[in-house]
Amino acid sequence: MKCRAIQDELLLLADPGRPGDAVVAHLRDCAACRQWHSRLLQVEKGVSLLAIPGSTRRAQFLHQFLGAPAAPCADSRQPARVGTSFPAGMWRTVRRGWSAWQPGRSWAAAGAVAAAAFLLLLAGSLVRTTSPVAPVTTTVRVPTRDPFVAGLLECNLRLAEAESPHPRMEAVADLADRLYAQMRKILRGGEADDQHDLAKLYARVIKEGLLRNAKTIAPDQRLVVLEKISERVSQTGEDADSLVAEVADESVGALRLIATVSREAADQLRTLTGEPKAMNRLWPSPALVALSVMLTTGRELQAPQLEENPRAVLLLQRNRALILELVDGGIALASAEDALVRADFCSSLAARMAKEIGEAATGRDNSRITEMGDHLEALLKRGVAANLTVDRLGTNLGSVRENQIRRVSKEVKNLNELTKPLEVLLDGAAKSELGDLRRTLQSIHEAQQEVEMTVTRRNVR
Amino acid sequence: MRLASQSDRHLAAEHDLVQKAQGGDREAFSALIDRYWERLYRWLYHLSGNQHAAEDLTQEAFLKAFAKLASFRAGTNFRAWLFRIAYNGFLNQQRGEGKGRPLYAESLPADKQGPAEQAMSQETLKLVGRAMSRLPNDFRAAFLLRVEEELSFRQIAGVLCTTEETARWRVYKARQKLMEVLAPQLDLDKP
């Protein structure tokens, strides 16, 4: 008992290497605790010995920060220098922004204007200096990898893989969560139109993806599948409601839409599971839930504060069309029971990614190429090939379905047409860039081969 | 005494740099970037488990810090303030990426072979890395701030927006969990 108390005390110390007199006295007499203590010090030492991949961007960042000669960003015909400036595509968006403003094109125009405004503000904040250094022309690199797009794609892939209602509904609920999380990110500093559009997408996912499919679940499975999801949706509604007081007036509508849709959806889900509606049952308050979680797990439940997130705003502008397609794809996949239909949807999404790669290659945006290359590879392997296997589809499908499989396979082969600019780019790429780009192309080809081999294996069987 | 005066000189120099940067001196802020980049990146790498994410977050933290420099109170701890900005960025990124744990690329074992490294086998260092990656984010964040940055519990609380007691408790839990996993292995390593 004494040993346990001593060990606990050591764990609680700021520096276990410098214990108090009482602990030192115990350690002197107790070999087991002495050994335990030395292990603890070894573990802490071991942590500081862990090597990690070195950072590669510090020098470049400092160089930009100090206002080195600007990259030729203003001219989108110039190839974007990898990692040193905005990708060419983003600059084109910004440059088009002012002239693109037209009623009815609010998504594109408002977004581009917001991006331009952000760039001007950022430039202003960097230029404000007492030293007579040349003014900075916003060459700060915005990371091109978009975690939001990656998250939406992951939901799509999980939907493509799901073969029962439970994982499917979970993936749809995650899709809705990600949309709400993204909207939260742009509540400060984002455009109201973008917030409303994300809120509308959220509403679509809830209504067309979640509720519509929830009704098709067998009654005896509903409680298991839907109970937690209805709580999650309800919490999102509460969170949106609670933020209304914190945001600008023009953002209130988007939050209210989310709150209303979530509340109604949670009620409908509870009805489906046979539970009473929220008004009639005693839900523990969020504070009580947070307290009980903290007491049982020691972890605090804390929603992140609202902060300006210029990166999220810019990436949203850039990937808007892709986001829309991924949400549409997710809703479609949510109701696709048939593996062949799921493979077909994924092949369409794959074509979209291949097109992005082609465009990125034309604009010499190497990091975009690798980002989209990863997505394309995942779609082909997890979305298309996996759904064409005998395990999922069975054998002797009949001529109509066999023709469908052949069509999907052909579409996958035709992706090479869309990614052709990447091969052209590889011919003229600098040596330092060759490795990453070749690896990306190689991965895409391997994923295409996997689809082809899956189809071939079916025929052999 | 000598250490204390070194630390004082370090803090005074930092205070000077922050003041100059607040006056718009980019050279001064770049000296702060130089001073803290690697440490912040290392911490964020351990949190995110991903090199690109850690570099993005590091870069973003410095940009935000520069933009908000006017709100930094002179005399408080710049490093803790910077790490707090970075942690908020990390939390926002986590929320955007969903509730699942990030795919954690394990830390590489040390490639140097000093006496300390020789005392611990490469295999054990791998285990330490793996055990670290399995800690909940908030435990790992607090633990690393204590062990690597040597921040006080009060400063850790400031970075993680929590109370001093919670910060101490998180470090305690992290150590406890690591010991549960690693102590038996370290016993096996004993020569």
Image (cartoon, grey):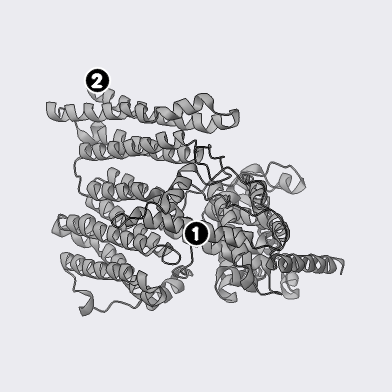
Task: Please tell me whether mark 2 or mark 1 is closer to you in this view.
Answer: 1
Residue labelled with disc 2: A460
The answer to which quarter of the image holds residue A265 is bottom left
| In-front residue for pair A321/A298 | A321
Q: Is residue A33 left or right of residue A345?
A: right
Q: Secondary structure at mark 2?
A: helix
Q: Residues within 10 Å of mark 2 (few under 14, many from 20)?
A: few
Can residue A29 be seen by looking at this rendering? no
| In-front residue for pair A146/B69 | B69
The answer to which quarter of the image holds residue A6 is bottom right
- What distance separates the C-alpha of mark 2 from that of mark 1? 58 Å
Residue labelled with disc 1: A118
**What chain is tagged by disc 2?**
A
Question: In the image, what residue type sits under mark 2?
Answer: Val
- Of marks 2 and 1, which one's residue comes earlier in the chain? 1
> The C terminus of chain A appears in which quarter of the rendering?
top left
